[in-house]
Every structure is written in C-alpha cells, then in structure tokens.
Amino acid sequence: MTLQITYRKPILKTSNLISPIIIGGKSVSDKSGLHAMSSRNLVDRLEKILELHLDKIIIFGMPKLHDPSGSQAWNNRGIVQNTLRTIKENFGKKIQVIADVCVCQYNMSGHCGILNRNNDVDNDMTSQLMAKISLSYAESGADIVAPSSMMDGLVLSIRKKLNDNGFNDTTIMSFSKQFSCLYSPFRLTTFNNFSKKIDKSTYQIGFSNSREILRKVKLDLSEGADIITIKPSLGNLDLVSRIIEMVNCKIAVQHVSGEYAMTKAASRNKLIDEHEWTMGYFTCMVRSGVDMIISYAAEEIAAIL
Ligand SMILES: [Zn+2]
C-alpha cells in the first residue's frame, strides 16, 4: 500500500510582508529586539531586503531635533524626506515605499497632533498638518502615505492636498488604531521623552468598541483611503474578517512592537519557538483575509519562506 501524503501549500508569501525601517541619526538597539538604523547603512539594508524578495517597506522617522510642534516632520530636508530620496535614487520602483505620517515622535508631548489650550489634540488643525506632512513625503518620493493619528476628516484633507498638487496616484493607507500598551517598545526606542504615560483615548479606539472601528473604516474609505490597516494585530483578526465582508479594498495589519517584543522575550527565555509561532500566527492573519502584514519580523520570516 502506498502512503498518501498531502502537501499543503503555504498560504503566507513574502509578498504579504512589509518591513518597517526606523531611521534616525544613529543606530539604536533596544532590549525589545527593535533596531533604529542610521541612514549611512540604508542602501546595504535595502539590498539585503531585496535579496529576501521583499518589496515593500514602511519608514518611521526618528529625528535628532524635537520642538513643540514637531516641525522636523515636514522639513523638506528632514530624516524621512532624505531617506525617501535616497531610496528612490538607488532603487527606483524596485521597492514600494510607505511613509508613516504622524508627529508623535517629532514633538515634545508625544501626542499624535497639535494641542490646544486645554492640552487636547485639535482635530482640524491636526488634519491640516498631516496633509502638509503627507505632501512633503509624496514630493520626496513616497508611493504610499500612511496617516495614523485617527482624526475625523483626516483622509479627506490628505487626499485633497495630494490631488491639488498633482499627486493623484499617491496611495493612502489609513490606520485604525486601538489604544494599547503594545506600542511601548516603539515609543521607548523612538520618543524624545518616554517617562510619562500618554492618554490617547480621545482619538484612539478601545478594545471593546468594535462598532466604532468599523464606522471609522467606512468613513476613511468614503474619504479616499485605498488601504486600511488595523493595529495591533493581536486580538483583532475578528475585525479583519468582518471588514472584509463589509468593504472591497486591501487590508493590512500591523504586528506592533509589543507583539514582536513579547515573542522575542519568550524565545529568549526558551519558552517558545519564535519562528514556529510567528509563521503560524502570520498564516492565521492571511487565513482571516489580511493582504499585508507590517512586522519587525518580516525579514526573519522572509528568510524562512
Ligand atoms: Zn502618532
């Protein structure tokens, strides 16, 4: 009797993966496993990424200078703008480049916008500011801008600003973000001052509120978003499945710094096999209908694939 073996095709592919690059004036390694890199090593890193057959990256800037408004975020010679130009000059269309659009790692407050007199984030002023930052990134070569501050009308103001300046083809990837402690390792690595806890509950969504996140996704799409990203990924795959039933667009998730750090910590303590867990978890994401996964583990997983 011949033994029947069923081979299952892996459903996770390198084309599902997006590698985040945290770029700053100097290289920083954190105990969470996160690395911020200096622009000096950028071209080498991207060559290695291409060798792994990855073709999408997202850039997070870590500026040297901070001020109350976070003005380095829209400085035409800022860290992200310079990085975008270097990538496009060296790699052209070989890599699709997404630029994270926010001011929290650029200003002094750590909030994702402009504060008013009551120290609340001002919705309309922040939306206009994000449109200005998005235009600056598009002019520097970003293929996709990824606003994450969750203001009402944010996507509309960015779409309008881009179209008014001839960037009709620049894609908008809009984040639907839950208020979570799982962003802490990223903030520890990149923020100017991480001593205080920042309450973002007025503009980010709580875990129990699925209706609000679904409403936000619909609103962003009606305003011109092309891709929806849900973060964190852990605990939110039910929302992904519901969104896929509801809308017709590409869906991404961000496997955030805290999720990555937890896996690394458990592996360091020899409690789990980190690659087996991550492969399995990413496969579940694709099974739920996710098209793209932003993850600090993207390069490790691409090497296995
Ligand atoms: Zn932010």
Image (cartoon, grey):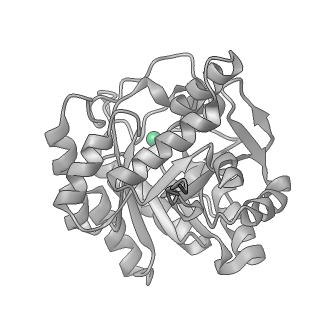
Q: Quadrant of residue 177?
A: top left
Q: Quadrant of residue 56?
A: bottom right
Report the image quarter containing ligand 1. top left
What is the total number of numbered labels drawn onto the structure image?
Answer: 0
Residue 296, percent from left and from top: 61, 43
- Which residue sits at x=32%, y=72%? 160
Residue 253, percent from left and from top: 42, 49
Q: Nearer the viewer, residue 132 or 244?
A: 244
Q: Nearer the viewer, residue 116 or 153?
A: 153
- Which residue sits at x=54%, y=62%? 98
Q: Residue furthest bottom?
A: 166
Left or right: 101 as drawn, with respect to 67: left
**Would you say residue 130 is visible in this rendering?**
yes
Residue 29, percent from left and from top: 76, 32
- Which residue sits at x=77%, y=65%? 51
- Which residue sits at x=66%, y=23%? 267
Image: 241 above or below 255: below
Residue 155, percent from left and from top: 31, 61
Q: Residue furthest front?
A: 1
**Would you say residue 69 is visible in this rendering?**
no
- State which quarter of the image contains the C terminus: bottom right
Image: 198 above or below 63: above
